[in-house]
């Protein structure tokens, strides 16, 4: 079934908010309507796996100057956000933190804003005459007392509050800054989705490798059991030990039961199916995938402990290598 997946930068969609948007039926699919743009993308399946590692950079320019947003993140068990903002924009930090919280589930996110005001648009200087007159009056009194001191007009102008610049239109600047942040956040989420898609492909390749090794072990086990049976019988014959055939048969059956790995192979195939299912789900699936890696490791360890053949041992080792490769990459999945 063809299902709409929205990962375009200009549409700020995430698994948390996707269900909140209005979907309208269109000839052979769905149409997603947004205030400014409409984006339709069809793919087979529904892949919303997101990486926790990403980077985005957006530069905003205006008559007031320019600003640069940079957002980067690495893997983390929970969501942690850190901000580096100029002092005049500290007030918007709660707004930014809330926007991150609505869009992200996990990861250590660092958000940096660099702001450069345009000197040509700075407000004109204004003289606070009342304060200047008071300073001159007090300075005159000091002159009378010391008889030899002189007041430098520049010293009066440097006094805090005497010369003031007209405040810039901070509402306009803040609006442009927040619009730039929204764009940076959209680019950031798109980068996480793109990286998540690459991780999904890599994990699926390793799952295919596990299938190959599991099939190899399953097909080889009858031959291994027969080889072990012949090996034990030959040892008794070489030692010329006359044993009750019924007793020998019972012992061989018990040995075959101890060597049997059908249960482990079946569980491996079950884990493979479940992992594929998780990769198709939306939302944060990193912890579920990490749990599945623990289950894979448990079966691989049991398989290795039952191995009495070099080929089975090699397959068990290869399984652990594939599982470890998946586990390392899953640490980066949200």
Image (spheres, rainbow, N blue to C red):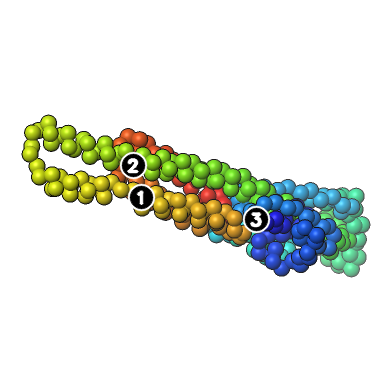
- Compare residues 110 and 123 and report the one nearer the observer: 110
- Compare residues 314 and 235 and report the one nearer the observer: 235
The image quarter containing residue 156 is bottom right
Residue drawn at (62%, 44%), measured in percent from left and top?
198
Q: Which mark is residue 136?
A: none
Q: Give the residue number, with chain letter if any, for mark 3.
A: 46
User: Which tag is nearer the camera, tag 3 or tag 2?
Assistant: 2
- Compare residues 225 and 30 and report the one nearer the observer: 225
From this viewpoint, is residue 120 visible? yes
Mark sitting earlier along the chain (2/1): 2
Q: Kindly indicate whether the residue at mark 2 contacts the one at mark 3 (C-beta within 8 angstroms).
A: no
From this viewpoint, is residue 151 visible? no
Q: Which mark is residue 262?
A: 1
How dense is the environment of label 3, judged by Cα within 10 Å: few (below 14), some, or many (20 and up)? some
CA distance for labels 2 and 1: 9 Å
- The number of callouts visible is 3
CA distance for labels 3 and 2: 38 Å
How dense is the environment of label 2, judged by Cα within 10 Å: few (below 14), some, or many (20 and up)? some
- Would you say 56 lies left or right of 242 here? right
Q: Is disc 2 placed on a helix, strand or loop?
A: helix
- Would you say 8 lies left or right of 276 here? right
Q: Kindly indicate whether the residue at mark 1 contacts the one at mark 2 (C-beta within 8 angstroms).
A: yes
Mark sitting earlier along the chain (3/2): 3
Q: Give the residue number, with chain letter if any, for mark 2.
A: 221
């Amino acid at each position: 079934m063809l299902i709409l997946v929205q990962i375009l930068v200009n549409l700020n969609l995430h698994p948390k908010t996707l269900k909140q948007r209005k979907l309208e039926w269109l000839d052979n699919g769905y149409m997603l309507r947004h205030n400014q743009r409409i984006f339709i993308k069809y793919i087979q399946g529904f892949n919303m796996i997101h990486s926790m590692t990403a980077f985005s950079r957006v530069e905003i320019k205006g008559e007031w100057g320019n600003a640069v947003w940079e957002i980067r993140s690495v893997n983390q068990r929970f969501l942690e956000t850190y901000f580096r903002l100029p002092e005049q924009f500290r007030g918007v930090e709660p707004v930014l933190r809330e926007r991150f919280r609505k869009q992200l589930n996990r990861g250590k996110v660092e958000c940096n804003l660099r702001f450069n005001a345009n000197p040509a648009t700075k407000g004109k200087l204004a003289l606070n005459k009342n304060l200047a007159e008071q300073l001159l009056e007090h300075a005159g009194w000091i002159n009378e007392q010391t008889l030899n001191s002189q007041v430098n007009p520049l010293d009066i102008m440097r006094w805090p509050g005497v010369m003031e610049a007209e405040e810039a239109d901070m509402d306009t600047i803040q609006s442009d800054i927040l619009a730039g942040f929204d764009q940076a956040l959209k680019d950031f989420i798109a980068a996480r989705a793109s990286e998540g898609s690459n991780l999904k492909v890599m994990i699926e390749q390793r799952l295919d490798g596990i299938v190959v090794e599991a099939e190899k072990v399953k097909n080889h086990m009858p031959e291994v059991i027969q080889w072990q049976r012949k090996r034990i019988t030959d040892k008794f014959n070489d030692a010329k030990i006359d044993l009750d055939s019924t007793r020998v048969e019972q012992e061989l059956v018990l040995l075959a039961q101890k060597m049997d790995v059908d249960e482990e192979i079946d569980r491996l195939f079950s884990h493979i199916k479940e992992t594929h299912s998780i990769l198709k789900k939306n939302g944060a699936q990193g912890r579920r995938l990490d749990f599945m890696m623990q289950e894979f490791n448990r079966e691989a360890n049991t398989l290795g402990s039952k191995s009495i053949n070099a080929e089975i041992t090699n397959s068990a080792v290869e399984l652990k290598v594939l599982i470890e490769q998946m586990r390392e990459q899953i640490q980066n999945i949200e």
